[in-house]
Structures are given as structure tokens and as C-alpha cells.
Image: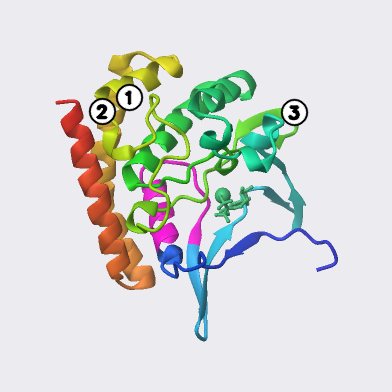
Amino acid sequence: MNGAPSNFILKPAMAHFQTSIENECFCMMLANSVDLKVPPVSIVRKESQKALLIKRYDRHLENDVLTRIHQEDLCQAMGLSHELKYQADGGPGLKACFDLVRAYSANPIKDLQQLIEWVFFNFLIGNMDAHAKNLSFMYQGRQIRLAPFYDMMCINIYKDLSQKLAMKIGGENRPEWIMARHWHRFAEEIKISKATLRKRLTEFCFKLIKAIDTTHSNFIIRHQGDSLVDDVIATIKKRVGKTLQQFE
Ligand SMILES: Nc1ncnc2c1ncn2[C@@H]1O[C@H](COP(=O)(O)OP(=O)(O)OP(=O)(O)O)[C@@H](O)[C@H]1O
Ligand SMILES: [Mg+2]
């Protein structure tokens, strides 16, 4: 009210996909359990209505005074219109995002590490919609850092939605066609060795599989069981299995 900064975001369900709330909540909890930086999320209900409640990361609280921290998504940072958020429409791909973070982050080692795991995570959970407006920079004083991650869910279970990756991995946007050679091409694009990519991706697969059951239990305690979450978990396990096979 009266221009005061808000400190939470209430995100309603996606049109035609009421389960997107549980889906995004579970995927954000899972991201947190594999050490991706994400804001706390929860589901709020009032009568027949529900929404995802997300804590804003672009706020600073000191002495009871809340101030705004400036953020800019990667399309804005590249001077591109929101109409260019998809690579297929001429928007940025992963190489451009990695180059930008490498050039501007005040802690490129940590931020590139987070970014690579963001790519792995979205691929493995079946999130096709990981475009450059779903990544942001935060400006803290004169320091630029990659902001925590947001807007991650398993799109793969909604077959009516596009099943093409918003940003290609090693030149391929059909997830089921991504093989070890595409990951190797991606490694070249982001300037790491093939061996490092393979090690990081396989380690991340194991970490994700290990985290799934505990996250599921925590989700059930907080929000009760949901068949949607079972479907999401089955999708993730299948994709992790296929990915590990590529590197055997
Ligand atoms: N926790 C957060 N703190 C601060 N800003 C946030 C947070 N989560 C999201 N945002 C900002 O709000 C914008 C919209 O959020 P989000 O991507 O979740 O919505 P969306 O409707 O799914 O977007 P789209 O479908 O266009 O990708 C983001 O691009 C980001 O700038
Ligand atoms: Mg978004």
C-alpha cells in the first residue's frame, strides 16, 4: 500500500493447469535440496482458492525498514525486448547467458557453478521453459550477482505445452534427443572440458536422485500427498536414468 515494497509474491495457477502450484512448489523445494539458490516457497489456501507464495529475494530488511534491491533479467541485461525471450524467436541461448555471467558477475566462479547446475536441473526435471527472462542479475551496491532461481517446474507432464527446450543444449532442443555429444558441445560453448562436464552432470544426477525421497516426504508433511508430485518424480527418475546411461 502507498508504494510500500512488497516482500512476497502470490503466483496463481497457470491457465488450464491448476496443478502448476504443487508442481512449482515441489520443484523449488527439490532445487533447494540440491543446493541451488532459490527463495522459500509454500502453498497458501483460502476457501476454494490457492496460490504459490514466494518470498522475494530482491528485498533487504534492516531495522524494520524494507528496501528494494534492483534486479534485471538477462534479456534486459542484453538490451533485448521480452518478445525475444525464446531462442527459437532469435533470443539468447545458453552460450550468451554464460558469457554474460562470466563478464559481469562479481563472483563468476560461484555464479557459473550455479548456472551450470540450473541447466542440469531444468533438463532433468523436464522444465522446457528455462528462458533468459527466467534468469536475473541483482545489483547490490556496485556488485552484480546472479539472482536466486525462480519459475522452475516440470512442464514435461503437460503434454499440451511445448516440449521443446527454450534454450538448446549443444544445438538440440528436443530433450529426448540429447545425447552425450550434445552435452560435450555444450561444454565447449561454456568453456569447460568434456571430462568436467561429464563429472559434474553425473554427480548432479546422483545428488538429485538422493534428494527426491526426502523432498517428497517434506512436501507431504507440508502440503499432503498429491498424484501430480508422483508423476513429476517418475518423470525426473526416468530422465536421470537416461542421462546416466549416456555416459556409461
Ligand atoms: N522470489 C522472487 N523475488 C523477486 N523477484 C522474483 C521472484 N520470483 C520471480 N521474480 C520476478 O518475477 C518475474 C516473473 O516471475 P515468474 O517467472 O515466476 O512468472 P511467470 O509468469 O511464470 O513468467 P514466464 O511464464 O513469463 O516465464 C521474474 O521474471 C522475476 O523477475
Ligand atoms: Mg518466468
User: Judging from the image, what secondary structure is the residue with disc 3 in?
Assistant: loop
Please give the residue where the numbered disc 2 appears in the rendered image: 179
Q: CA distance from mark 2 to mark 1?
A: 7 Å
Q: Is residue 197 visible?
A: no
**Residue found 49% across the figure and 28% down from its top:** 94
Query: Looking at numbered disc 2 in the image, what kind of residue is underneath it?
Result: Met
Query: Looking at numbered disc 3 in the image, what kind of residue is underneath it?
Result: Arg
* Camera-nearest label, 3 or 2: 2
Q: CA distance from mark 1 to mark 3?
A: 35 Å
**Residue found 75% across the figure and 33% down from its top:** 141
137 sits left or right of 125 in the view: right
Please give the residue where the numbered disc 1 appears in the rendered image: 183
* Residue 147 is inside the magenta segment: no
Please give the residue where the numbered disc 3 appears in the rendered image: 142
What stretch of residues is rendered in magenta? 23-41
In the rendered image, residue 154, in percent from the top left (x then y), is placed at 38, 53
In the rendered image, residue 95, in percent from the top left (x then y), is placed at 50, 23
Q: Is residue 207 above or below residue 32?
A: above
Nearest the viewer among 144 and 191 is 191
User: Judging from the image, what secondary structure is the residue with disc 1 in?
Assistant: helix
Query: Looking at numbered disc 1 in the image, what kind of residue is underneath it?
Result: Trp
C-beta proximity under 8 Å, tags 1 and 3? no
